[in-house]
Amino acid sequence: MNEQQKACVGKRIPIDALHEFCTEVMVRHGLTPDHARATADVLVTTDTWGVFTHGTRQIVPLMNNVDHKAIDATAQPEIASDGPSWAIVDGHGAMPPASGVYAMDLAIEKARRTGIAYVGVKHSNHFGAAGYYAVHAARQGLIGLSMSNVDVCMTVPFARAPSIGTNPISYAVPVRGENPVFLDIATSVVAISKVLTAKAAGTPIPDNWLVDENGQPTTDASSYPGTGSIVPMTAHKGYGIAFLIEVLSGILTGASFLSGINRWIDPEPKPADQGQAYIAVDVDAMMAPHVFADRMKKAVAEIRSAPKAAGHDRVYLPGEMEWERRDDAVANGLLLPDYVLMNLFTVADKNGLSDRLIGLFG
Ligand SMILES: NC(=O)c1ccc[n+]([C@@H]2O[C@H](COP(=O)([O-])OP(=O)(O)OC[C@H]3O[C@@H](n4cnc5c(N)ncnc54)[C@H](O)[C@@H]3O)[C@@H](O)[C@H]2O)c1
């Protein structure tokens, strides 16, 4: 970053301005305005949740995929086959957040007619934070689930090499008068982006994140990608769930799976051919809406009333920390970490938009 760009460190940027900037960058790389806006919404929303590893920072690798035609800037997702409560969508290599919103909207529409619907997407790429799509369903009153398979980078118990992806999964449930409860996680001990962030910063990582080529713990983030593999979340449990995600996102959709997936963050990426799965459950079809809402309120209250551990005065529902960070970002603008700013200025420089981006910081 140059001196003017460095002066933006520690300053906040309004979320609408960041959204507009990201949309402009993507349109300049050939995306349709609709797909650019949909993608900017996923990335900026993810930043507002404080999940900076998967927010606007990813505009750099995403645009690299567009420039290498690994993501098709103008392709439109379309239904390849469907029934009353399911569909397989061909992403045609289109921008994954656009395919994701299209697929979840389709799942919602079908679930409203049938109670529950599954929509799988093939020929996709990196869709970012799984939570965005699950919350999209919950905002419309349905329970949403979203998940994706990912290029292999995670070991499985008793293996010493990458054998499966860090396959993320999210669910979101509407709560009357509040933001949805939502969980959004990788099935690895942490998302691989956290390893890459430590690698870029040259800092060691905890010794339970990666194993080396002998399957032994290492704190060396620079061993990934290469000899290091990330470890599944709580061993066989994360591995077992990652395998289910592989089935629903990859095997059942007709996308590539396991070692067949190309790594989207390669400098010269090929189409990743990842798959995603979206599930919508229409609670109104199964229970009177006010009964479900009352029961959720009771469940949420019971969790909140849990006896607190020493040194703690509250517990959190899944997603609650993210909603509190979002409230702050909406009210005061986003305080982006340096590594995110670096990526934003990289794309800004490339597109002659650096002065414009500098001007957006308060
Ligand atoms: N697309 C991809 O290839 C890919 C791959 C892996 C991960 N990801 C994304 O990476 C992101 C980060 O994943 P991660 O595994 O590092 O997440 P994480 O370990 O930070 O867990 C985050 C989740 O746990 C909940 N949580 C955290 N502390 C809590 C507490 N005390 N009480 C209740 N809930 C709590 C949060 O609300 C959130 O839902 C996710 O958005 C995920 O979708 C994407």
Image: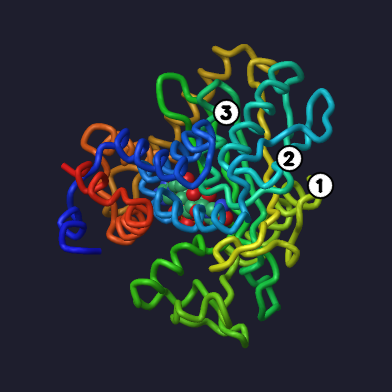
- Calculate the distance from the C-alpha at mark 1 to the C-alpha at mark 3: 22 Å
Q: Nearer the viewer, residue 77 or 132?
A: 77
Point out residue 79 in the picture as x, y percentages from the top left corner. 77, 32
Q: Which residue is mark 1?
A: 252
Please state, as top left, top right, bottom left or bottom right, where the C terminus lies in the image: top left
Q: Are the residues at dot 1 and dot 2 in contact (C-beta closer than 8 Å)?
A: yes
Q: Residue furthest front?
A: 352
Point out residue 187 in the picture as x, y percentages from the top left corner. 59, 57
Q: Which residue is mark 3?
A: 137
265 over 323 or under it: above or below: below
Which amino acid, by three-letter code, is at mark 1?
Leu
Badge 3 element: helix
Badge 2 element: strand
Q: Closer to us: mark 2 or mark 3?
A: 2
Please state, as top left, top right, bottom left or bottom right, where the N terminus lies in the image: bottom left
Which amino acid, by three-letter code, is at mark 3?
Ala
5 over 34 or under it: above or below: below
Point out residue 28 in the picture as x, y percentages from the top left corner. 45, 44
Residue 330 falls in which quadrant of the image? Answer: top left
The verdict on label 1 being within 8 Å of ligand 1 is: no
- Calculate the distance from the C-alpha at mark 1 to the C-alpha at mark 2: 8 Å
Q: Which mark is residue 120?
A: 2
**Badge 1, how many Cα within 10 Å: few under 14, some, many 20+?**
some
